[in-house]
Amino acid sequence: MSSGLPKDWLESYRKETAERNRQMKERLDIELPKFRRELLGLGIERIVADYDGSGDSGCFEGFVMYGANDEEFIIEKMNLPQGGKGFKDKIIGFFFDILEMRYAGWENNDGASGSFIWNLTDDTLKHTHNENTVSVNTTKHEGW
């Protein structure tokens, strides 16, 4: 019985995924250091971003930026162009690319959730990823 897929579909998928990941990593390697300097210049020292998804859709629920002494930065109060929309999109875009490189399809089926913590002062990134699974316990009985 044929699945209708070409015999080499898995190999093709792997190559496409590897190429997409290579391009994302290349872009991140160039853009992240510049963006880090920009963020540090604004006084931002740490960003925490949370995501959640299932049923074939997922998103970043938001992020919080912190400065010295855990002072919270509010984008809308930072006097950025367009109220910071492009700035927000850029931050979420970086985290989304990293998530997709590590866990492509993370939002499918039972989905996943997690968080990123980017410490800009020492340029470290902590990522906690939680994969949702279904557990089934079966008990069988015979007779009364």
Image: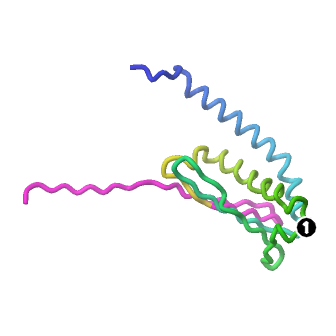
37 vs 93: above or below = below
**Residue 100 appears left or right of 86:** left
**Residue at (75%, 42%) from the top-left corner?**
24
> Residue 4's spot in the image, x, y percent?
48, 21
Residue position marked by numbered label 1 in the rendering: 79
Colour approach in the figure: rainbow
Give the image quarter of residue 95.
Answer: bottom right
Q: Does the magenta stretch include residue 136?
A: yes
Secondary structure under the numbered disc 1 in the rendered image: loop
**Quarter containing the N terminus:** top left
* Residue 97 place in picture, x, y as percent: 71, 48
Image quadrant in which you'd find residue 141: bottom left
Name which quarter of the figure residue 37 lies in: bottom right
Residue 61, compared with residue 108, is above or below; it is below
Q: Quadrant of the C terminus?
A: bottom left
Q: Give the range drawn in magenta.
A: 115-144
Q: Which residue is drawn at 55% across and 47% down?
A: 56
Q: Nearer the viewer, residue 63 or 40?
A: 63
Q: Does the magenta stretch include residue 143?
A: yes
Q: In this view, does 58 lie to the left or right of 26?
A: left
Figure check: 112 above or below 48: above
Residue visible at 66% across and 50% down in the picture: 99
Q: How crowded is mark 1: few (under 14 residues within 10 Å), some or many (20 or more)?
A: few
Residue that sits furthest to the left in the current view:
144
Looking at numbered disc 1 in the image, what kind of residue is underneath it? Answer: Asn
